């Protein structure tokens, strides 16, 4: 359910559970954590994270969320691993991003989304607390007031508004999503990993 394609200095990670809106199970999160840990020492220059189907991820698998996955520390570990990667990371969001799945996208350096994507984090309605790093990264991108709109007011925002707010960096047509993501990482992919890491360190973690 997690695909990994290695192409020299570029790794592409794909959520592949489209029949369940790419909702994340504990096994999928464990695999994402493992891949991020491997990537940290692999000397790659870029990593692209995307999904199959029309939804990037609906967040936690509902059955596993009820059994405790929604508040499991694994979410924080996955986002921390991604944020700590020394390479350029790009989330190519093929559709809607919901709930705790925000963590991995917020931890990336750049985010692209298709026009039909929407963004919501329904922790108020569901009675869960968001992951602490998600709150910090969300507020850093969109500002405290808009973070309150998403987390406290439960706002559901579309791609155009997400772009205006700074939650995403670019909108791409569905057929151009991966090509655009690959274009964004082309410079880093051609560089030395240490050079990429040095510039990323100067900019600070996501």
Image (tube, rainbow, N blue to C red):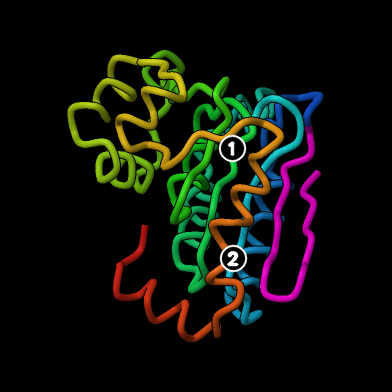
Q: How crowded is mark 1: few (under 14 residues within 10 Å), some or many (20 or more)?
A: many
Whether residue 70 is in magenta: the answer is no
Q: Is residue 17 left or right of residue 170?
A: right
Tags 2 and 1 touching, CB below 8 Å:
no
Residue at 25% x, 45% y is 140
Question: Magenta-highlighted stretch: main secondary structure?
Answer: strand
Residue at 42% x, 38% y is 168
Up the image or down, 202 lies above or below 180; here it is: below
State the quadrant of the N terminus.
Answer: top right
Number of residue marks:
2
Q: Name the residue under label 1.
A: 93
State the quadrant of the C terminus.
Answer: bottom left
Residue 44: name its quadrant.
bottom right
Up the image or down, 59 lies above or below 2; here it is: above
Q: Using the numbered discs, state the Cα–Cα distance from disc 2 to disc 1 in whole angstroms.
A: 18 Å
Q: In this view, does 15 lie to the left or right of 116?
A: right
Whether residue 6 is in magenta: the answer is yes
Image coordinates of residue 129 in percent, x first then y, are 38, 31
Q: Which is more toward the observer, 172 or 78?
A: 172
Residue at 58% x, 30% y is 114
Question: What residue span does the magenta drawing correspond to?
Answer: 1-17
Q: In this view, does 91 lie to the left or right of 203?
A: right
Question: Which is more foreground, mark 2 or mark 1?
Answer: 2
Name the outermost residue toward the left.
Answer: 145
Helix, strand or loop at mark 2: helix
Q: Name the residue under label 2.
A: 186
Up the image or down, 68 lies above or below 6; here it is: above
Image coordinates of residue 145 in percent, x first then y, are 18, 27
């Amino acid at each position: 359910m997690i695909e990994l394609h290695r192409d020299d200095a570029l790794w592409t990670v794909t959520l592949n559970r489209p029949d369940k809106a790419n909702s994340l199970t504990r096994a999928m999160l464990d695999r994402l954590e493992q891949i991020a840990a491997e990537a940290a020492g692999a000397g790659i220059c870029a990593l692209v994270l995307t999904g199959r189907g029309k939804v990037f991820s609906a967040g936690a698998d509902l059955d596993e969320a009820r059994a405790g996955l929604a508040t499991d520390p694994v979410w924080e570990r996955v986002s921390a691993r991604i944020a700590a990667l020394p390479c350029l990371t790009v989330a190519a969001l093929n559709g809607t991003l919901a709930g705790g799945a925000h963590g991995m996208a917020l931890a990336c350096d750049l985010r692209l989304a298709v026009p039909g994507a929407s963004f919501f984090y329904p922790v108020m309605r569901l009675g869960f607390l968001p992951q602490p790093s998600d709150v910090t990264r969300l507020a850093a991108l969109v500002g405290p007031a808009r973070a309150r709109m998403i987390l406290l007011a439960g706002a559901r925002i579309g791609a155009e508004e997400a772009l205006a707010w700074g939650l995403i960096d670019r909108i791409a047509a569905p057929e151009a999503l991966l090509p655009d993501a690959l274009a964004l990482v082309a410079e880093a992919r051609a560089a030395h990993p240490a050079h990429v890491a040095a510039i990323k360190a100067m900019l600070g973690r996501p």
